[in-house]
Amino acid sequence: MEKGLPSASIETLQKRALILAAIRSFFWERKVLEVETPVLSQYGTVDQHINSFSVDSGFDQTKRYLHTSPEFAMKRLLAAGSGSIYQICHCFRDGEKSRQHNHEFTMLEWYRTDFSYIELIREVDDLVRMVLGSLTENYIVEKMETECITYQMMFNTYLGINPFSATIEQLQNCASTNNINISHESMGENRDDWLNLLLSHLIEPQLGKGKLTFVMDYPASQAALARISPYDVNVAERFELYIDGVEIANGFQELCDSQEQEQRFIADQEKRTQTGKMQIPYDKNFIKAMSQGLPECSGVALGVDRLVMFALGLENIEEVIPFSSEIA
């Protein structure tokens, strides 16, 4: 691209606009309310794997954060009685720049007050097929199967190991056997770090090839804001959607217990301290809203830019956004 010109073609941006219109029509027909929440907040995410952009205010001498997701504010609306809601918004994550990442990106996030996470998987499938069908030949969409597998089945199928019982030594041996040469010292004793390494290097590239692959029931240690299964304390009611080796969406049966959520936030802050990450205040307004009553619900965040990439057969996020971070 020439310096100063858009990173995406005008034709691509026109097709992107059609996709956004189709998404809004999808939710309009299902009577899901569109909302807008603040991009700038006095609180940020405390997830150790996500870095926030901070902004210093000259007005009141306070630090604020560009949101990495609209999740907390949207759940405050749910607690206020909004019913099912969705939002299409820009999100910001520091340090994420690659073929599939841009510091600023577009997210579609929605919450269903009357859905289980299994029902939400079906709705995600419906939406993705609608988007793909609106821009591609119908036979391509019709040929795409939907596959649902558990996290445990995924590791058993692709690597022959049980992710819930394998020792760190076994996970390291699996990495070494598959030519991932990384030392135990550099990775440490966190099992989830080893599992994520194997997932990203060996499994993810094989997921969603010619199909929509939903991975369900993650380890409880990777619950994030998901509810722990009432049937198995080792499992979090969480799912992710993969298409063509790329994660497109991440969804939960939402945790509604404010005390447990606050404990998770505090634990996340401790992990950030241990790894030398910037300390960020967790969202106390969100916890207060939860304590007043977050309805039973499921929710999902879907990367719009990645979905547009797949729908148009493009390989770089810069090809589907008007201006990449380097030329914005």
Image (cartoon, helix red, strand yellow):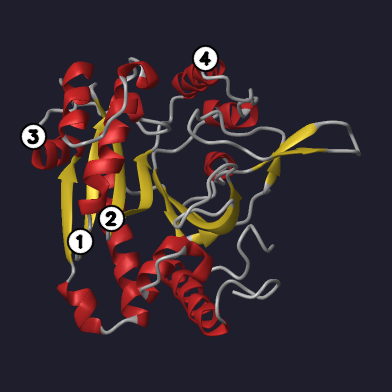
Separation of disc 4 and disc 3 at Cα? 32 Å
Separation of disc 1 and disc 4 at Cα? 38 Å
The residue pinned by badge 1 equals 209
Separation of disc 4 and disc 2 at Cα? 32 Å
Mark 3 residue type? Gly
Separation of disc 1 and disc 3 at Cα? 20 Å
The residue pinned by badge 4 equals 274
Rendered image quadrant of residue 312: bottom left
**What is the crowding at mark 1: few (fewer than 14 residues within 10 Å), some, or many (at least 20)?**
some
**What is the crowding at mark 3: few (fewer than 14 residues within 10 Å), some, or many (at least 20)?**
few
Mark 1 residue type? Lys
Sequence-wise, the earlier of marks 4 and 2 is 2
- 45, 187: nearer the viewer: 187
Secondary element at tag 4: helix
Query: Percent x, y for residue 175?
Result: 21, 31
The residue pinned by badge 3 equals 160
Whether pointer 2 and pointer 3 mark residues with C-beta atoms closer than 8 Å, the reply is no
Instruction: Return the mark for residue 245.
Output: 2
Sequence-wise, the earlier of marks 2 and 3 is 3
Query: Percent x, y for residue 43?
Result: 66, 32
Whether pointer 1 and pointer 2 mark residues with C-beta atoms closer than 8 Å, the reply is yes
Is residue 290 rendered to the left or right of residue 139? right
**What is the crowding at mark 2: few (fewer than 14 residues within 10 Å), some, or many (at least 20)?**
some
Sequence-wise, the earlier of marks 1 and 4 is 1
